[in-house]
Image (cartoon, grey):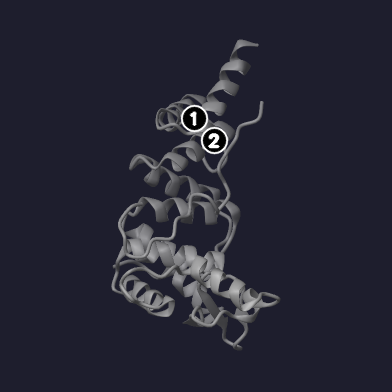
Amino acid sequence: MRIKTVLLLVAPLVILFGCGEETSSDKSDTNSASQTSSEVTTLDELPSFLSEGLSPEEQAELREQILPGGDDGLSAGEKFQALLEDARAGDPVAQNSLGVMYYTGEAVSKTVTGQVLDNDPELAAGWFYRSAEQGYADAQFNLGLMYANGEGVEQDMQEAVELFKKAAEQGHVDAQNNLGALYFMGEGVERDEDKAIAWFEKAAAQGNEEAKANLEAIKAAQSN
């Protein structure tokens, strides 16, 4: 039987520019600081690793996709700076959004030697950590994925379980499915099929297809 999990840091991540939707310790930020000297954005003028080989029209389209302009008249760089200021001021939504941007490379960072990084998972983890400490479910889920995958932080399945649990208890559907999978497999937590089923059922009730498939797989195995 194959249990399906959502352990990819892609689809669940939504970039939010100060729009709600979906002070803390600096443990992860300290790890990031050893690698990254400063946070920079050159999104009004795309860095070479993004713009190489693109026509001016394609560069303009990519710039719009990375930081779309709004009706407020702000440029992409101004939007980023506003988001950064909100994050530094303690806004958990902005902090999570910055984490997403640094993970995907939509915001640009440099090493202490000035090398531009395609993406910066350590800095991303630092921002997720700040947001997660304030109880923001999306950030708890995202940081849980970082710990599960060993990206930006050392792999720690027990920490991933704790973060998924905090998000799942707030109703985060992907965290519920992942938590069910980890209970079923006994990864980072003592194996408990009943708890696995309970979390799968919560996620399935919210329409999560992966959780539904997991429940069907368990039922099929139990009937054999």
> Which residue position is annotated with label 2?
181
Q: Secondary structure at mark 2?
A: helix
Judged left or right of residue 210, residue 2 is right
> Which residue position is annotated with label 1?
196
Judged left or right of residue 82, residue 158 is right
User: Which tag, 1 or 2, sits closer to the chain's start?
Assistant: 2
Q: Residues within 10 Å of mark 1 (few under 14, many from 20)?
A: many
What kind of residue is marked 1? Ala
Residue 216 position within the rendered picture, expressed as x and y whole percent measured from the top left: 56, 21
Q: Quadrant of the C terminus?
A: top right
For residue 107, the mark is: none
Residue 27 makes an appearance in the image: yes
Residue 145 position within the rendered picture, expressed as x and y whole percent measured from the top left: 52, 52
Q: Residue furthest right?
A: 53
Query: Gap in Å between the C-alphas at discs 1 and 2?
Result: 6 Å
Q: Residue furthest bottom?
A: 113
Instruction: Give residue 185's quadrant in the image.
Output: top right
What kind of residue is marked 2? Ala
The residue lying toward the viewer, choosing from 90 and 189, is: 90
Task: Check contact, mark 1 vs mark 2: CB within 8 A.
Answer: yes
Q: Is residue 1 above or below residue 56?
A: above
Q: Residue at x 57, y 86 (%)?
A: 112
Residue 88 position within the rendered picture, expressed as x and y whole percent measured from the top left: 33, 74
Q: Quadrant of the N terminus?
A: top right
